[in-house]
Structures are given as C-alpha cells and as structure tokens.
Amino acid sequence: MSELRELYQQVILDHHRKPRNFRRLAGANRTAEGFNPLCGDRIALALAVENGVIMDAAFQGAGCAISMAAASLLTGHVIGRREEEAEALFRRVHAMLTGDDDGNGAGLGKLAVFDGVREFPSRVKCATLAWHTLHAALSGAAEPVSTE
Amino acid sequence: MTGPGPRWDVDRIRKDFPALHQEVHGKPLVYLDSAATSQKPQVVIDTLVDYYARDNANVHRGVHRLSERATEAYEAARGAIQRHLNAASSREIVFVRQATEGINLVAASFGRAFVGAGDEVVISAIEHHANIVPWQMLCEEKGAVLRVIPVDDRGDLIMEAYARLLGPRTRLVAVTQVSNALGTVTPIKEIIDLAHRQNVPVLVDGAQAVPHQRVDVQALGCDFYVFSGHKAFGPTGIGVLYGREAWLEQMPPYQGGGDMIKVVTFERTIYNELPYKFEAGTPHIAGAIGLAAALDYIAGLGLDRMADYEHELLDHGTALLSAIPGVRLVGTARVKAAVLSFVLDGVHAHDLGTILDHQGVAIRAGHHCAMPVMARFGVPATARASLAFYNTRAELHVLAEAIDQAREIFR
C-alpha cells in the first residue's frame, strides 16, 4: 500500500484530475504525437518556440493518471526554458525513470514525484510518453512517437 | 448449478494448478487473466517434462526407438484433439503455433486459391486483431473487400445486418465463437447455417471457446476452426487448425520445408498428404503432446459441469461489480462467457490494473487486442477480469474489495 501511495502521490492525482495546459495551442510551431500501443494512451503535444525559447506549451490526449499527470507537469516545467534546457530535462527525467540516475530526482522539483514509478516497471512507459513526445517535437520528428 | 453429479470441487481442482498457490506483493494470488493465458495443471507440466526427459527426438524421420516414441506420442496427441473436437478425421487436425497462425494459414492458403478482386470476406465488429488483420492483408493484396457484421450496445451481433452482408461475392465468413474483450457468445451455429445456405464457408475463432465449453465441429458444421493451446490450459506455442478435408485438399501449402513434402527435385515438389502438407519443419512436438494432456484433463473434469460452474461464477461476479458505484460493465450480451470487462469512473484501466496487482489480483487492462471494440463502445481501454473453472467466489470478493480500494485512492 505504501508503494502504491508512493506511485499515486497527491501531486500526481491532482494533475490527473485537473491537468494544466490541457488545451489547443494556437500558434504552435512544434508539435508531436505520442502513443502507447500497450494501453492506448495518446498525447498530442504542442509548443510555441521563439528564438530558441519555449514560450508556451500545451497538450491534449487521453490516458492513465500517470501519463496525464506527466504531460501536465511537463508543460509547466518547459514553459520559459530554452530548447536545450528542455532536452536536458528530458534526459534527466528519463534517467530518473529508467533507474540510471542515482540522484533520485534531486533538483527536478515537482518532477521528482515520478521517482516512485521506477518500482513499477510496467508503468515506466506511461511516465516517459510525454517526455518522448517532447523530444520528438523539439527534434522535428514527423512520425508519431510510439513507446513500443 | 444444474445437472446431476457431484458438486464442482474447486478447492480440490485448484490443487492441480501449482502457479495459483503463490503470493504477489504479499497477498495470495487471485488470477483473473485466463483469457490472456490460462494457468497449467500439473499433469501438463509433467507431460512436458516426461517428453523431454524420455522420448525427445524428431518425428516422422528416424528409424530409431526414440523417434518412434516421439512420433507415436505426437500422432496420439493429434488423435486426442480430433476426438475432443469431434472432427471426422485426424487428417483434419493441423498443428500451428496458435489461433493467430491458424487464421493466417487460412487467409494465405484459402485466400490465395479462392479469393479474388471484388470478392468479399465477412468478419464481425467484435473480433480480436488476429481475426481482422490477416483478412485486411488478404483483401489489400487481392483487391477484395472486408465487410463487418455490426454489434449492438450490449455486445450482440446484429444478425439481420449479417444476413444482408452475405452476397454472391462473399467467399468466406470468419467470426469468433466467444469475444475475448466482451465475453459475447455469438450465435455461431446460426451464423454458419446462414452462410452455408449461400455455399459460403465459415472459419470460427474458438480461442475463447475451447477453454470454457464443449466444442463439436461436426455439429457446428464449420469449415475451419482455430484455437490456441495456451488459453486451454496447455503450453504456449501450440495451436490447432481444424479444416474440413474437402477444403484442405483443395488448398495450396502455407509454408514450404521439410515434412510437408513427399518428393523434392529442383524441377518440382510433390507435397505430402494431409495434414502434413500444412506442417512444414519440425513441429512443436512437446507442445502438441502437452495440449492433448490439457484437453484430456478438462474433459476428465466434465466439460458441461465446468461450463455450469463458470456461468454461476460469472453471474456472481456480474452482480458484485454492478453493485460498486462508478463501475460500468462493457459487454452485457444475452449469452456471455467468463469475461467481466468494465470501466471505473475517474480511474483509467491501467491505473486500476496496478492497484489491483498490489492486492494480488491479476487482471488485464487495455484494449485486449480489439481496438475496434473499444472504439465501438467509446472507451480507450477496459479492465478485464476473465474467469476459469479454477476461480472461486471468494476471489471475486477480493476483486470487488480491491476495486473499492482504487476508488478510495482516486477519491
């Protein structure tokens, strides 16, 4: 049960119930779609980038609490950052979720709430979906991202 | 429970399944994912061990003693499966990897011979991807058309629409006997009879039927019938295609290789007789023998009593889940088998699956390899508890309590 509470922390449940930046983004110039064929989670991420800075970010989609909260928190964390900072964040979050990072999410702020996901191997892809989609949007990938 | 005979002694039967007796996350395992794959009785495990420990050799080749024993056991397995399905001849029993390969075999072989441009193949809206994609691939290759029998809001096929779909260009009907995602039991006999009235052959996907009920292919009158061993308490990697001899004789081979030939020269090959024409390469010998042991095991328990017990469990589970606020059952067909597919308000199926797992309850969460079914019912995914004869009422109560806990966490 404590492991479950570790996974479903209040921050995650809150962002699941009330996802931030869940909207269409007029004027988006970087977009990507992410899809988890295993569970059907879908995310469409849109960014408005000016002079290398992410001025706005928004998403739409449907999925489990982990994937929706991850997308919601992601948007909040990348708005106002330079593209390369967002890419660095992607790498750090990815390392935290896949267990390559000994720092347990230190310095990641609220994103550290996803640290518990590592204990749930079948759910790691739920948490990384939005981040892979971000990476695809920033690198201009044309194909939808698939976690498989 | 109906019918004569002793009551279903589920406690004794559970002793036959070693995997059921373990803890998951510190809780006794409640295995409710048998529609994905069933657990295996000890007799099946022992059969595999004995085969590899004593008889292991290649079949249909060696003159040595072990090869003779392996061949004998492999062909005895074919005979056991023929009797289990009440097929007319063991020549009609083709070993494949699973139901999926059986359908692909028919699509490739029957399709190559009998389906052309403008022809039509009829499937239903509640098929598993395995009974959709091979036909799509065939239709694309041949310029044929895929027609789909619609389903109503309960999950029953709309038979009037089916009757209208059958036409002069229909070359094959391929329909499931039991839906894996909804539990719908289709009126398969009626489906077959309607098609036969227009001389259209019918393939039945029996992957979810064989584990739960008696199947008699001659009584059904179907032309092809496929199922997977691993869902029927047998090993993975083995399945069966039943095909009427008259069709199999007319169909070209599926794969080429050893065992499916009589004579090979560089100019020409003479194919082997049935069923070997469709069994290229060394087969899953142990799997076939293990599957026969599994089917003998369930036949020994009593197939009709097994079905009665499961229906009683299903009714109990349906009542329990329906009473939980926020639970909506997806799939309420008039005749159902062993599947409780549902959604819980405000909790995604994937989250529910994780929470239930922590209570030791194993269910499937997702689209169940039936994305068109999910789309039809307007849900991205469902949670699915699927039952087998080794499940108990007490386990259904654990399921219901675990769902309550999920509601608590997400409140």
Image: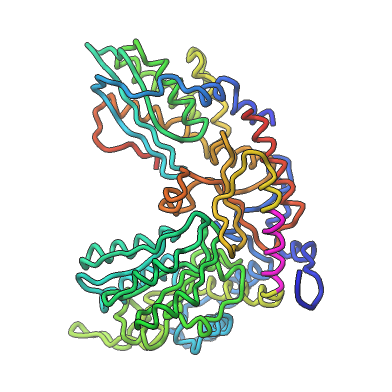
Above or below, A34 relative to B198: above
Main SS, magenta region, reads helix
Is residue B70 in sight in this rendering? no
Above or below, B259 relative to B122: below
Above or below, B125 relative to B5: above
Residue B140: give x, y in percent of width and height.
Answer: 24, 62
Asked whether B38 or B288 is in front, the reply is: B38
Q: Is residue B34 left or right of residue B3?
A: left
Q: Residue furthest left?
A: B267
| Residue B331 magenta | no
Name the quadrant containing residue A43: top left
Is residue B308 in sight in this rendering? yes
- What range of the chain is rendered magenta? B305-317
Residue B371: give x, y in percent of width and height.
Answer: 42, 51
Residue B342: give x, y in percent of width and height.
Answer: 58, 47
Q: Residue furthest right?
A: B6
Name the quadrant containing residue B313: bottom right
Residue pictured at 38% horizontal, 74% vertical: B281
Residue B81: give x, y in percent of width and height.
Answer: 55, 80
Residue pictured at 41% horizontal, 63% vertical: B124
